[in-house]
Structure formats: structure tokens, C-alpha cells
Amino acid sequence: MKEPAVSADPTQTLAFDTSCHLFDGCGFPAPGLHSFMFEPLWGDADGNGFYFNKPMLLALLGSIIVVGFFWAAFARPKVVPGKLQMIAEAGYDFVRRGVVYETIGKKEGEKYVPLAVSLFFFIWMLNLWSIVPVASFPVTSIIAYPAILAAIVYVTWVSLTFKRHGFVGAFKNFTGYDKSLGAVLPLSMTIELASNLLVRPFTHAVRLFANMFAGHTLLLLFTIASWYMLNGIGIAYSAVSFVMVIVMTAFELFIQAVQAYVFVLLTCTFIQGALAEHH
């Protein structure tokens, strides 16, 4: 039996033996964890010094693209906006009015608009790399990136809660303190405390990671299957698989935007909870 080969090329996302086809006596080279692992573009991956790989490069390029886009759009703003400024204003206003104002309110929320806009477009860009030729990889499908973003939100939310309410007020806020609960109050407070300070940041990161990981795996599955079955009578099956690649790509476009939106919506919900008065 011919075994599928894992490529050492850091730019190779599919990482399978391209000479392997159906009826050739080789097994289906299914995507796996190897599809999310990349050799360093430079440096040593064994921990001996600094190294830089493809996801890091895409994250860096994503940051430059987002900053460059808004810089170009607003460097010389005009009363009658051009096309670039109009698109940037529409995106900015969508996050400001549709997410921040609706969740936190205009008065309290205005100061958090830059954070929400930055998170939304940065996450969206990292997600979009999945369908960009050559890149073909969503950076947020590596847990480290959503975890860092969720940690930033977590620190902002917790520090804001203590700043607004003080130690006692923040404790009540995190535990959902309500003396009317009577005997079940200690149990309720324990559950709420664990939910807010432990489970909430975990689910915030994993929600984004899991959706992008699953979506990229499905795209790889149908893409590899299209090539693998491109042999003999399998060409008919390959055509069906290729149609699924197109369908999944369109679906991923939708999911990529939704996940950026959900992450920012939850961020604003946490901030709103930090600002709300405890009763």
C-alpha cells in the first residue's frame, strides 16, 4: 500500500501525495493535524531561538492590510467620500451602530468603538485567508490566536468591572449575588463565579477556533477528495466533490464574517455587563 506523504514545505497546506489517486492502490490521504502544522519559514521550530512560520506571516500581513486599508481611507477624509472612504465608513459604522451602540449604548459605548472595530476587521481578515489562493489557511484555526484575543477581552472586562464597582461590587457582579436565593445562594455564586471567570473566556476563544478549524478541515476534505478521485470512473465522483468545494467556500465566506461578528458581539456584551449596576 502506498502511504500518503506529509509535505515539509511550509507553504503546502494540503500536505498529501499528489500522485495518489483512486484505484491506484493507495489509501485516501485524509486531512488531519498535519494540515495545521507548518515548518518554519526561518528559524528553528525545536525551541532553539526565534522562528517564524506561515500562520505568523499571515497574521502579520493581515494586520498590515487592515491598518493600511483604514489609513488609506481616512488619511485625507473628504466631505463627499470617495469609494474607499465610503466602504471604510460603512464598515466602521456597522460595528459602531450595529454592535457597540446596540449592546452597550451610545453614551457608554463610544469609547469602546475602536476596540470593537479593530477586533472585528482583524479577525475577519485572519479568517478570510482561508479562501485566498496561496495563503489557503485561516489563522484563527490555530487556538493560540483566538486565545490571545480572548485574553485581551478578558483582561479589559475584568479590570473594567473592578474599576467601575470596586472589589465588593465586582465580586457581586461576577457571582450574581442575590440574597433572595436563600439557601441555594452559595451554590449559585460558586457556579456563576466559575462560569464567568473560567468558562466564559474559554468558550469565547474556542467558539471562534472550533468553527474555523472545522470549516478548514471540510474544505480540505472535499479539495483532496476532488483530486484523489480524478481517475477513471471516479471522475464523476470528483465532479460532485468539486461542486462541494465551491459550496463550502461560499459557506465559509458567510461563516468567516459571522464569527468575527459574534466574537465582537460577545466582547461588547461582557463590557456591558461590567458597566451595568448590580442590583
Image: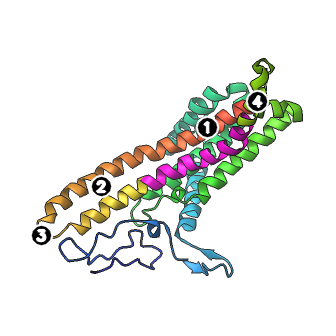
Secondary structure state at the residue bearing disc 3:
loop
Q: Nearer the viewer, residue 64 or 125?
A: 125
Quadrant location, the C terminus: top right
Residue drawn at 27 percent across, 63 percent down = 225
**Considering only vertical position in the picture, is 67 above or below 185?**
below
The image position of residue 130, as x and y in percent, is 44, 57
Dot label at residue 275: 4
* Residue, far right: 167
Is residue 39 depicted above or below 248 in this figure? below
Tell me which residue sits at (65%, 49%) in the image. Answer: 150
Task: State the extent of the magenta-drawn residues as a range.
Answer: 192-214
Give the number of the disc on residue 245. Answer: 2
Q: Residue at x 65, y 42 (%)?
A: 200
Q: Could you say where residue 75 lies in the image, as x and y percent from the top left? A: 62, 48
Amino acid under disc 3: Gly
Q: Earlier in the sequence, mark 1 or mark 4?
A: 1
Residue 167 pos. (x, y %): 88, 36
The answer to whether residue 21 is above or below residue 136 is below
Residue tagged 1: 266
Q: Is residue 103 left or right of residue 213?
A: right
Distance of label 2 from label 1 (alpha carbons): 31 Å
Between residue 79 and residue 192, name the one nearer to us: 192
Taking 30 as reference, is 165 left or right? right
Mark pair 1, 4: CA separation = 14 Å
The residue beneath circle 3 is 232
